[in-house]
Image (cartoon, rainbow, N blue to C red):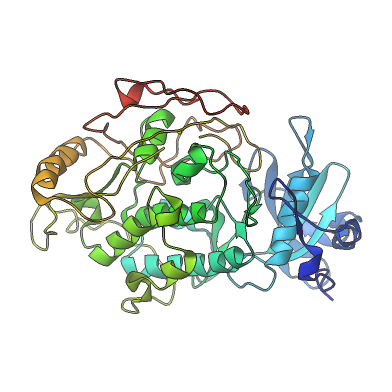
Amino acid sequence: MSVLSGLSKADFKTGSDGLLELPEEKIRSIMRSEPITDVYHVEQTPFARGKFASVRKIRHLVSGEEYAAKFIRKRRRAADTTREIQHEVAVLALCHDCTRVVRLHEVYETRSEVAIVLELCAGGELQRLLDDDERLPEGAARRALRHVLEGLAHLHARRVAHLDLKPQNLLLSAGGEELLICDFGISRAIQPGAHVREILGTRDYVAPEILSYEPLTLAADIWSVGVLAYVLLSGYSPFAGDTKQETYLNIAQCQLSFPRDIFRGVSQRAIQFIRDTLVVDPKGRLTVEECLEHPWLKDESDIPQAIVGLGFDAQDLASDDEGDSDEGDCLNGVNGHNGINGVNGVTNGVNGHKDVNGCNGTNGTHDDDKESTESREECSERDKPLKHAHARDLSPPFPDAPSTPKVSRKSAPAPPSVLALCKKFQPDYEKPAVHSPRPDRAVLC
């Protein structure tokens, strides 16, 4: 009998900080106190590691079944994080019947750590596929994003925001046919009328409203889906700069472009999907249900049986103009707004806010004459070497974060004023505007 069989929806309560809570007796019934080594053979070498957690393959001593065990330390920087760990367990338990979320098997607890036993996804992280193949063919990207959104629909129906969607937190089945969402360490339950404010996420994937310390919403995940779509289709990160300040500013202004050399062959429907999800105003983004009904994702053509990779072909990057889009060398768009820090359940927050209306056009509309000139400027800047979305940053910006994608970005052609807020978490986070003559001088701690 599953350890989760005695749980009902009424058992799940939401704290004021967005953490799910279970009654003490339910937690005790889930947590096993005997040594995990009495039940499983535990491999000594982790196949994934973070600052406060590691993941090891384990094998049941009787059945021989293999699982992944996530070992999490209970104390981080002298603070007890038991509630955060129990929240992660509760989210996994709440989604136990969803085939797009990694399945919880059981949990072991000692005085110093908790081991969460999960189903083993033998295909590994989607990130590894990008490391090998740089990008996905469009059909495979559609399949992957469908699976992500199906899992996200299950979460959002239960008012849970993941808040850290990225290739490292998406796992493949052994044959690569299925994609599952994992790592709910910084997820939050978002109840109507509640105002949970935290600086959470991974630098390149974080939504602009989180940077400006606005209340968390489910729409933050849709922004991350848009970034993910861009990364899967191009192999590059849409907002990453050479410094974290550049990245924050690019997100704040929604500095979004689609250079033809890395988007050659990508359909206009795919590009429109990215535009519809990367909207600065959370209320203007698609919902998860609308994403699944988007014409691009509803398209059944070229959907492979497995999510497989495709390296760049030399012919794809040739300089010939056959099949070029009528939108010019670069497809620019979207509107602008908004300042980050924090990851993996530990918040090292910075408050930031920008009030900007920027970029060339709004959500796919554009002025042809203006765009023609600005597109050439954009592509001229893009002539310098680019780094792939999976390139490893040797100096990770977050103390607890994995390396994040990097790609060269240009500065905004017409610098707006910048509201620079560089203080750590404070009640008086809204400060008077500080005008900076250049966006690259904005310092976001």
Residue at 74 percent of width and 46 percent of height: 84
On the rendered structure, is 158 left or right of 444? right
Indicate the quadrant where residue 27 lies.
bottom right
Question: Can the viewer see residue 403 in this picture?
Answer: no
> Which residue lies most toward the bottom here?
300
Pick the residue in front: 143 or 152: 152
Q: Position of residue 232 (x, y in %)?
A: 38, 57
Q: Eyeballing the image, is 444 above or below 147?
A: above
**Residue 289: image location, x then y, percent:** 47, 70
In the image shown, does 444 or 50 lie closer to the viewer? 444
Residue at 25% x, 37% y is: 385
Number of marks in picture? 0
**Residue 122 position in % (x across, y down):** 59, 64
**Residue at 65% from the left image edge and 56% from the top image edge:** 191
Asked if residue 284 lies left or right of residue 52, the reply is left
In this rendering, position of residue 161 left or right of residue 284: right
Quadrant location, the N terminus:
bottom right
